[in-house]
Amino acid sequence: MNNRREFIKQVGLMTTAFATNSLFNKVHAKDFENINEQRMGANNVAVAKDEDYWSFIQQAYTVNPEIIELNNGGVSPSPRIVQEAVESFNKLSNQGPSYYMWRILDQGREPLRAKLAKLAGCDAHEIAINRNATEALNTIIYGLDLQAGDEVVGTQQDYPNMMQAWQQRARREGIVYKQLSFDFPIENDDIIVASFEKALTPKTKILHITHIINWVGQIMPVKKICAMAKKYGVETVVDGAHSFALLDFTIPELGCDYFGTSLHKFLSAPIGTGMLWIKKENIEKIWPLLCNGNPKSSDIRKFETLGTRSFPIEQGIGEAINFHTAIGNKRKEERMRYLKDYWATQVKDLKGVKLHTSLKPTYSCAICGISIEGITPNDLNAQLFDDYKIHASAMVYANINCVRITPQVYTRLADLDKLVDAITTIAKRG
């Protein structure tokens, strides 16, 4: 009888994130219900500045207080409940991996797919679960049937892994990969859309669009670019690594054909999680990146033939969705924008300081690039960490030279005050 109870308990873990006994419901649900009820009717911009509200959110994370982590654009930590869910699933798996992973945890993928689809505002049969944006977008890039001479248009400010994938196809198969170049920040959608449109020729098949430029946080006018491309019969691939679970949007409303993202950035899902979206009518024509018995199937699951992978990490995504949903898309977006504005507005007029990101809400959210005259990005980044234990990221690529600062919902204003003090001091001494 005890063994039977234990078995039922373990099987119950399979649906933990989607059931009434989820870790989120046990730890956070009641408190979220209370704090959200207290702010009912308050607009999201006002709540973004409500430090009592965000103090509750901050307590859910386990970040090291000795380091001010401001490189969340690279990868974000997960809330404690997400970490604990992964640990529980991992312990369960190691009691008998081939049984608990493939017969128990694997059954949780469909509920997870449905949960992700709800968050993305799309059909669950358009969502594949994988490990990061690189894997998702490489699946599309290498899966498209393109011929020698077919043209793809992207930019020099796209993410390197995606540029390299297109360049490899160009070298190996003779497709033509054209790259635009932009000097950000740009506060005029028409300039960007017109640049893409001018690059089109009768041979153009694909536009590759980065929703939020990872280097400096510029929000690209994806909807307008996709609408323009559609007029010419050109398909669109969107890199949403830095936009999903940050900006308040649904994937279908972008008007794109393909979308890939990482979930370990602004969703705060376990490290090494991602998502692929393909418009339903396009699934059949895309070849899987890894082998599948029916590569021309119209089933989105053909893109999940990854072999053995971490089922515990995959299932941990569910608790991250619970946590994110309790905050709300728009409320989270406004908080992240407020945090960026909080520090950036205080340093933008300092002598020698340059912001590489617009402060207008339409063109930026969480990410902001900064440079100081006479100091290289690598040196500035080193000074921030060595002298102030502020961890950011130096961005030196093409025409971009800055340090990228990216807070998250757990970031405290006191930490951003230290950032402002650090930038002020470094700028004064040059």
Image: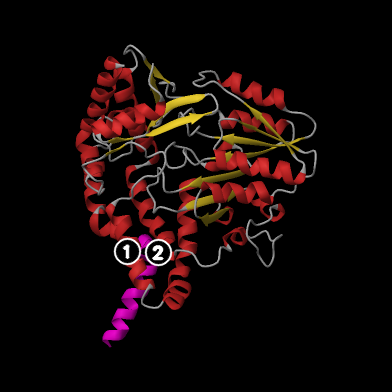
Residue 277: give x, y in percent of width and height. Answer: 57, 49
Q: Please indicate, yes or no, whether residue 53 appears anywhere in the rendered image.
A: yes
User: Can you tell which quarter of the image residue 381 is in?
Assistant: top left
Residue 87, numbered label: 1
Q: Nearer the viewer, residue 112 or 315?
A: 315
Across and down, in percent, residue 53 comes to 23, 38
Q: What type is the residue that disc 2 sits on?
A: Pro
The image shows residue 112 at horizontal and vertical percentages of 45, 59
Q: Is residue 176 left or right of residue 342?
A: right
Q: Nearer the viewer, residue 303 or 68?
A: 68
The segment highlighted magenta reads 1-20
For residue 312, the mark is 2
Please tell me whether mark 1 sits on a helix, a strand or a loop. Answer: helix
Give the residue drawn at x 24%, y 43%: 58
Please say whether residue 13 is one of the residues in the magenta stretch.
Answer: yes
Q: Please say whether residue 188 is one of the residues in the magenta stretch.
A: no
Mark 1 vs mark 2, CA separation in Å: 7 Å
Name the foreground residue: 56 vs 238.
238
